[in-house]
Amino acid sequence: MAAALLILVMIFGLAPRLHYSGANKSDDPCFKIKKMKQDIIAAPGYKQLYGTRDPVYVKCYPLTIFLTWKLADSVDTRFGRGWINFTLNEEYPAYLMLHYFSFDRLKKNDLWAYEIVGPEPCELPCPGRVKAELAELAGQAIICMDYYQNCKPRAIELDTLMYEMNPIYKNEQEALFFVHWEEGKTSGEISSSEMNARAEAKPKGRGVVAWTSRYWDKENYKIELNGTGINSNSLHNLSLNSDWPPEEIFEGMRTGLMTKVLKIDANEPPLMPGEARYSLKGTLTVKIAFAPIQEERWRITVKAHEKDTTKPPYVFSDATGKSLQAAVRADFDVALAAEFVVRKIKDEWTFKEGKVTQAEVAPSFIGLPLDLFQCTIKECAGMDGIPAMMGNNIEGTIEGKKIELTWAPDQWKAHGKRTSACVFCKPLVSSMKKVPYKQEFGSGELVYVLNSEFLPLQSGLTVNRKQGDYLTYTINLVKIK
């Protein structure tokens, strides 16, 4: 027992003094633990007790950590109310270290301590370890449009276009995940990546005081687990009571995935009358993948032919004055393509990311005689149509090994992105009426039905569909790698 106590002190005592040169060049999250075990073997007294025996009572497992920060952050001041509601997604590698009592006590109930640390391997500034995405953000910042002493408050709307993510700032890694459990007690800290308002988003002008609102500053959020908290009236540093018992860790190792939701509901009253009041509400969802992650990249292509036959016939007079009637319609040949990535953890498939790589529409107009009219056709101005989808992200959900893709955001699900064609035809014969023909054609049906497709993830899959006499399309699905 004395030897085990000595070894435990060595592990948690040596760690701060160890040098981990080469960590950033490694892709092994357990790099530091393996280095630590080498130092344990080389420590004074170890060889006399155990020779060159590997300290198997220290075990390390690579992990992947997924964090979703969904927070509503607000501050009320005498100048007005500033607030942001945002969703921040983060992903990075980490390690799980289990420390048992001794060489011969490696059962679950003999666990002395464990810790989870990420991003790893990391020797600041940990280049490329953290993937951070600001999925959504809305809010407003209150600034002074004149000098602070003569403040003319103005509310500036905030959105994701005005913000950028800084997982790494200078030589400091802001994103951090550290959970330590020892003999029934949990401690640790979880910090988010840094959000920063873009410089070009800040209003310019003589006397403008942008720092009246803290949302122009670099911000990240820190949660201390079962601690005393850091005294900060901005609530960006707060303490939460949350147990992380080993039973949850071992269950996660068995199933391959562990999920915890930390609920945040904190208010900070003004330190003095008239000063700022802060509020922070929301959740931090932690998902830890214990099993290796398998990823697949897929390509989906869509070829469609769509018709708009809903417009009334066009009545006109020919060169002799004879009244004629023409059935008019617009046809659209549509080519869509996207690439997306799905991932498997243990036996569960999830959608990771996707992007539209092709969004083209070729319209044509049919109906008026070419010897009597000269027609031009083009996409209607101001339309947020299918070509505008190019480069957009797509969403997806997986059930079993079937996938449903959302090609356009939620607000478009009711009718889909539209094909559109504005037609302008002028008479060619001088004796005809000079009144031109103008009409707008289009449909939102294609993207609407694509958003409802539930396809098996099967490479080489071809699906042919028909909707009435106005829409036909073919879907091809291929696994790239």
Image (tube, rainbow, N blue to C red):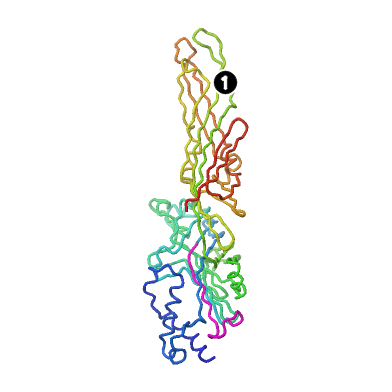
Q: In this view, does 298 lie above or below 378?
A: below
Residue ranking furthest to the top: 320
What x and y, as percent, mark residue 380? 49, 32
Q: Residue at x 50, y 33 (%)?
A: 333
Q: Quadrant of residue 38?
A: bottom left
What x and y, as percent, mark residue 143? 47, 55
- For residue 182, say whether it is visible: yes
Q: Residue at x 52, y 88 (%)?
A: 4
Q: In this view, does 112 lie above or below 296?
A: below
Rate crowding at label 1 as few (under 14), some (14 to 19) or many (20 or more) other CA atoms within 10 Å.
some
Q: In this view, does 186 lie above or below 391?
A: below
Q: What stretch is highlighted in magenta?
A: 91-110
Q: Mark 1 points at which residue?
A: 327
What x and y, as percent, mark residue 197? 44, 56
Q: Give whichever of 56, 114 is nearer the camera.
A: 56
In the image, residue 101 lies in the stretch drawn in magenta: yes
Identity of the amino acid at label 1? Ala
Q: In this view, does 23 lie above or below 357?
A: below
